Amino acid sequence: MNPNIILQSVFLFLTIGVFTSYAQKSTIAGSITGIGKSPIQFRYVKDGKRQVDTVFAVNDHFKYSPKGSDDSTLTMLFATSGYLRLWVEPGEVTVSGSFDHPFRLRLKGGKENALVDQYNAAIDWKYDELANGKPDSVRSKLEKEKEVKTRAFIQSHPSSRMAAELLYWQSMYNDAELATHETLWQAFTPAVRASKQGIKLSQRLNAVRNQPVPGKSAPDFTIPDVSGSPVSLADFKGKYVLLDFWGHWCGPCVRAFPALKALHDRFANKMTIVGIAAESKNDRDKWVNMIKENNLNWVQLSELEADNGKVNQTYNIAAFPTYFLVDKAGKVVSKSNAIQDIESAIDSIEDLK
């Protein structure tokens, strides 16, 4: 089992956009066997604020009228299991299926939803079924096949924001295909490149292109610590620095605390550990309590912008935890999602023996 938490776990679900023009009314109508009269939440961001609307199904049916969204996305969240992100396009969008299989819902209504349904049936669901119960070696081969099929699908739909969103998530999981992803990006129509999805994708590709890697300088930053005082990476020049990108909500991050404590105690005079937490403003107290409860007595910082912080983007943090070992001159020595790799890198450095 991969110990890393991939940002937003969205690899299980397809992200698609919501219609934001108010000239035509949009409606989401659902017919989901077994949903009964359960509540359904619709989550979105409007005017920079997260919003939640709730409707109740009646006899397995529900209807919802979207109120707009900054980034054109809407998440439909079920009370007991699963969620689906979808486009809301002009007119009526229908969602159908079974409550027993919330990740196999069918969509109709609008160009983007048609493409989503096509992709789900032909690629996403198909490869999930093929990989189910197979050994890791077979699953890995199937995953590579799925990537190839997905890139071909993206290439076939250069005027689709849904395709741009797919490419965004492809780029999240495979930095090595940067050149291919950039070629696909260039093939999108100007309208798609200028859309919210296109802009997000462009920023992502730029982050991959310029990310710090071993041998390159670690970008400087200034972030407030727990008390609100600004702390910069440059403050520690002349010492080794271990950057720990984590979050209070991240199980593997928390399980690595004992190893980090051991490193802190062992190299206190030669190496500084700097925690950089992906926390929202609303979760500040949870972050602070996690630090206190676990006695994390090294530098702790957070932009309080969740995983959208500038430093997270600059360092291309796509999984948690992520560690960077930086040398005394400010260059990256090692990058890994596994604390064991960082321990090995530290043990190989003469200055730290």
Image (cartoon, rainbow, N blue to C red):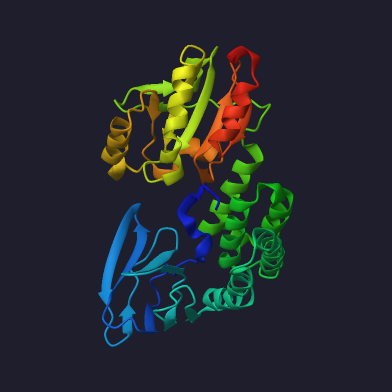
Foreground residue, 88 or 223? 223
**Image point 66% across, 30% down: which residue?**
214
Residue 337 location (% of width, % of height): 56, 40
Describe residue 71's horizontal placement relative to residue 287 as left or right. Answer: right
Report how many numbered discs are placed on residues in the image. 0
**Image point 49% across, 39% down: which residue?**
312
Q: Is residue 238 above or below residue 209?
A: above
Foreground residue, 49 or 258? 258
Q: Quadrant of residue 102?
A: bottom left
Foreground residue, 339 or 69? 339
Q: Is residue 59 above or below residue 244?
A: below
Describe residue 51's horizontal placement relative to residue 12 as left or right. Answer: left
- For the C terminus, the quadrant is top right
Residue 255 location (% of width, % of height): 43, 40
Residue 182 showing in the rendered view? yes
Q: Is residue 241 above or below residue 155?
A: above
Residue 339 location (% of width, % of height): 54, 34
Foreground residue, 57 or 2? 2
Residue 264 location (% of width, % of height): 45, 21
Describe residue 195's horizontal placement relative to residue 189 as left or right. Answer: left
**Image point 28% across, 45% down: which residue?**
282
In the picture as drawn, the residue positioned furthest to the bottom comes out as 59
Residue 273 showing in the rendered view? no
Q: Quadrant of residue 32?
A: bottom left
